[in-house]
Amino acid sequence: MTNTEKKEKPDLLKQMSSVVSHELRNPLAIISNSLYFIKTKLAAGGAALDPKVVKHIGVIESEVKHSNDVIEQMLAFTRVRELRLAHAEVNSALADLQEGYVVPAGITLKVDADPAGSCVNADMEAIGYALRRVLDNAVQAMPGGGTVTLAASQDGELVHFTVTDTGPGLPAGDGEKVFEPFFTTKPRGVGLGLTIARKYLEQQGGTAKAQNLPGGGAKVTLSLPLFKA
């Protein structure tokens, strides 16, 4: 492969992802709007809906959401994010994440605030996105239910966001492989969540690592430089 080809390949991937996302997002939006119209019309009659109809409406909504999530991850993976750094309190970020994250049935989400009340200078929208991807991975690793713990701490130089779960742990105990693009052990998934999480952390001078816990389960740590006044 020539140097020109090597340079053109990432650009082509970005262009392709943008075109595909545009061509898919429009029909997905139409499907969502049409489904909303159908649900409104069905509810207007006042009669109880056929359980099979309710089930299939739920299936459509779930598939539309999944498709949009895949598109979002593709774009996050291929595009260079323009960072907007700002002073932020770690515990406020944890509270916002806890409030906005939809916890599936059977999953318990515990949040342990940073006792030191640390601050960072970071793009917290990007960090929040990264943490949601890590939380998603932890939740999906426990289809039978379990506990996910989101915590923050600092060691004088770095602030650490950790997500631990009570699932089966990382495959073969490999903490690096899970960050490889398109690596996944799930039947449905593009395998970009942790890749994007590490990308956003490294863009801000941070790191991301994963490991199995001695008593079972996995732990993912996202670290950022501590803001020192």
Image (cartoon, helix red, strand yellow):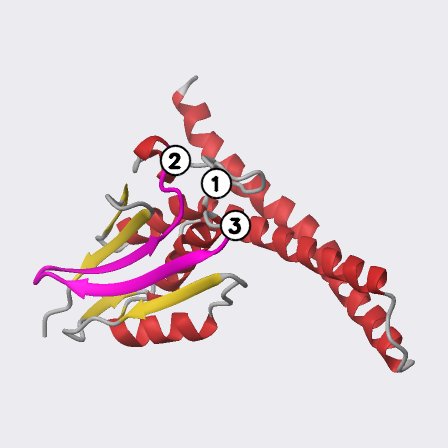
Q: Residue under circle 3?
A: 143
Between the C-alphas of marks 2 and 1, the distance is 8 Å
Please name the amino acid that badge 3 sits on.
Pro
Labelled pair 1, 3 in contact (Cβ < 8 Å) = no
Labelled pair 2, 1 in contact (Cβ < 8 Å) = yes
110 is within the stretch colored magenta = no
Q: Residue under circle 2?
A: 180
Q: Which dot, 1 or 3, sits closer to the camera?
A: 3
Q: Residue under circle 1?
A: 191
The residue lying at 33 percent from left, 71 percent from top is 94
Is 117 located above or below residue 134 in the figure? Answer: below
Picture coordinates of residue 125, whole percent (x, y):
39, 66
Picture coordinates of residue 133, whole percent (x, y):
43, 54
In the rendered image, which quarter contains the C terminus?
A: bottom left
Between the C-alphas of marks 1 and 3, the distance is 17 Å
Span colored in magenta = 143-171
From the viewer's perspective, tell me whether residue 200 is left or right of residue 47: left
